[in-house]
Image: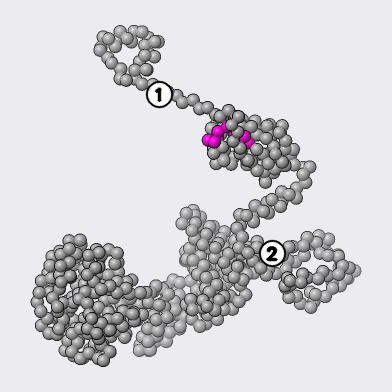
Amino acid sequence: MSKFVVSARKYRPVRFDEVVGQRHVSQTLKNALQTDHLAHAFLFCGPRGVGKTTSARILAKVLNCQNRTEDYEPCNTCESCVAFNNNASLNITELDAASNNSVDHIRALTEQVRFQPQQGEYKVFIIDEVHMLSQQAFNAFLKTLEEPPPYAIFILATTEKHKIIPTILSRCQIFDFKRIQPNDIIEHLQGICRQEGIVADEDALHIIAQKADGALRDALSIFDRIVSFSGDRIAYEAVIENLNVLDYEYFFRAVDHILTEDRAGMMLLFDEVLRRGFDEDLFLNGLAAHIRDLLVCKDPATLQLLEVGDRLRERYHQQAAITPPDLLLTALDVANDCDLGFRLARNKRLHVEMSLLRMVTIRRAFRNEPISVAPPPADAAPAAPPPEKKTPDVTPAAAAPAAPPPPDTPPPAAHQPAAAPPATNFASVDMSSLIAEAEGELAATVPSEDLPELDDESLHKAWDAFLLEQKGSTLAIFLKQALPLVRGDDEVVVKLGSQRAIASLRDDETLVAFLRETFERPNLVMILEHDERMKPVQTKVKKRLSAKDKFLKMREKNPALDELRRRFDLRPEE
């Protein structure tokens, strides 16, 4: 079996300049070495796989290096560096606090601090995952960490700084490591590919960098897995297949369906994604990220936020150029609402499909141009466009006057609707308000003579019918004391004598829904008014009887119970 070494260990940095994405830490440590302002205790904190332990090992090696370079890097050739590289250095001690977190382990460490270094100037103690130490271990370590010998240097590393007690934090010089940017990860992977003789697509390395989420060690682990899968040629298709990542092509097609208002195409695309084994929320979140990238392409100042390869960058520019920004913002808002309610949805597929269909109908729902009911007469001159409104480009054939149809051709329908012009402007409008407005327009078109008459007499009849349906309920008790009156065509005023009744009726929409259905007025409004002259509803509170009261009532019905009480010396409780 070959002695394979993973890339995270094989290409582990051995100099400060080789640490990826942490120049602020490396340069500060080198300046401290140069000016001899080195602290006795350091705390390296940050996400996983960003170089905390690696930087600690490099610093420990530099401190005892016998031939430092001019820029304070380890030489890696002296006796101390070679011993460290072979894990045989007696002056550098590494402790994993995840498995050595008791007081006894810390006491053994502090005992080693008492002995001076056998070779070199410093004795360095590296404690990894220091947040795993117990409370007692932290307390046992405090005094040594605060006043160590001049030759002792402590380097603590952790991913969870908030779990370390403040007394430890106050004794350390803290360095915050940041997540590594995708461009830095890609550049590092390209260097490894050159050394290993591997040909990799730039888009494939972009996917690996994004999947690593700022951790270089995770990126190298993914890189090794892809190399094992595809060999010396890393293609974009192989990466998305191995990492179970949705191809960008699906999201480009989804936005095309939104622009062309293709409901069937969007439904079939979503079904294809599900049949490939991807979850509904994965497609939804990927589509939202894709729409966000299209918005990024709209402004040259935000182009630097687009983290894709050159080939995909050109496709993003092309699609962003034909997509209005208001449409993108509205679609992103729909995707966000769907994501918020996804976890509570019982039918998750239907929940996502409804949101996708809402995205497809954005252009139709928010189009500003009116749609003509019938075409203008053939002999009428075409109306001139408004001076300030841009008209859509038309072909010469469409702009020419319509020729009379041949005799054999049947005449066009008299009420055939004209084709709607393409949308040019969009506005982010609430769908519920749009639907309510449409319902109001629909109700206004109904002839008034066909509606049931709404007056005080018909209102009281409907009121009594509703009370009969709600007989025995709390709502019916309040409504019996109310006075309904008609005010206007679609307005009913209900006067009540108590604020409690008003609050109860305001929370219950059963009555207003019943009146709207009875009088066929979907826009009917019910106004609640408080009238001091109205008699408020009085609710009787039944008094709770004590044991003595119950006995007295029973004795009234049966006097023999009193004789029984005296005979057995019974005393009813108060």
User: Above or below — where is 126 with respect to 452?
Assistant: below
Mark 1: which amino acid?
Arg
- From this viewpoint, is residue 50 visible? yes
Type of amino acid at the residue the image marks with label 2: Asn
The segment highlighted magenta reads: 494-501
Residue at which label 1 appears: 544
- Residue 303 is marked as none
Q: Which residue is mark 2?
A: 368
- Residue drawn 70% across and 69% down? 422
The one nearer the camera, 74 or 203, is 74
101, above or below 571, in the image? below
Res 486 → quadrant: top right
- Residue, x 60% and y 29% (percent of image)? 533
The magenta stretch spans residue 495: yes
Q: Secondary structure at mark 2?
A: loop
Q: Is residue 292 left or right of residue 405?
A: left
Place of residue 146 in the rendered image (x, y in percent of width and height, measured from the top left) = 17, 70
Tell me if I can see residue 221 in this picture.
Answer: no
